[in-house]
Amino acid sequence: MNSLVFFLIFFDQLVKVLVIDFFKIELVYNRGGAFGLGNQLGGFACLAWLTGLSLTAYWWVSRSALSRSRQLALSLMVAGAWGNLIDRIFRLGPVDYLDINPWLNMGNLVWPIFNLADIYLVLGVGLLIYNYAKN
């Protein structure tokens, strides 16, 4: 699963470079937490990411026999967290670029702009919840 994590992180960063450098699409730097909440948190958000990532990694390593599905869920979560953490360290914050609002007709409600790393995180958490609910 380690190679999957590294591939997912690489792919996330590659997509961001292509979006920023090649297509010149307008982008958003998320300086807060998930979905832009807490933009005023600044360095605390980076510390929170590191703490969450460390706890996930510890839990992952401490579990001796995880099913393939749980390994996939944790791999997605770690890759998503690292993808956004790399942006926090080397850019102004996570690079968000996927805007689905033009396809949604939600009136005054606006869905937050997100990135591939966010998708990894959501899929990983969802898969982990599904696995625990199933057992």
Image: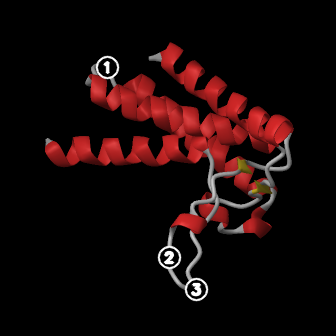
Whichever of labels 1 and 3 marks the residue nearer the N terminus, that label is: 1
**What type is the residue that disc 1 sits on?**
Ser
The reply to whether callout 2 and callout 1 are in contact (CB within 8 Å) is: no
Nearest the viewer among 115 and 20 is 20
Q: Image check: 8 left or right of 66?
A: right
At a point 64% along the width and 34% down the height, the residue shown is 82
Residue furthest to the bottom: 108
Across and down, in percent, residue 121 comes to: 50, 44
Counting other residues with Cα less than 10 Å from the Cα at mark 3, is it few (<14), some (14-19), or many (20 or more)? few
Q: Are marks 3 and 2 in contact (CB under 8 Å)?
A: no
Residue 95 picture location, percent across and down: 74, 48
Q: Nearer the viewer, mark 2 or mark 1?
A: 2
Q: Quadrant of the C terminus?
A: top left
Q: Position of residue 130 (x, y in %)?
A: 25, 46
SS for dot 1: loop
> Dot 3: what SS?
loop
Residue to which mark 3 is pinned: 108
Q: CA distance from mark 1 to mark 3?
A: 48 Å
Q: Is residue 74 above or below residue 127?
A: above
Q: Mark 1 — residue?
A: 64
Q: Is residue 28 toward the left or the right of residue 126 in the image?
A: right
Q: Is residue 57 left or right of residue 112?
A: left
Q: State the separation of the CA atoms marked 3 and 2.
A: 9 Å
- Residues 38 and 21: in front is 21
Task: Mark yes or no: residue 84 visible.
Answer: yes
Q: Residue at x 79, y 69 (%)?
A: 40
Q: Check the image and name the residue furthest to the top.
A: 3
Residues marked 1 and 3 touching at CB (< 8 Å): no
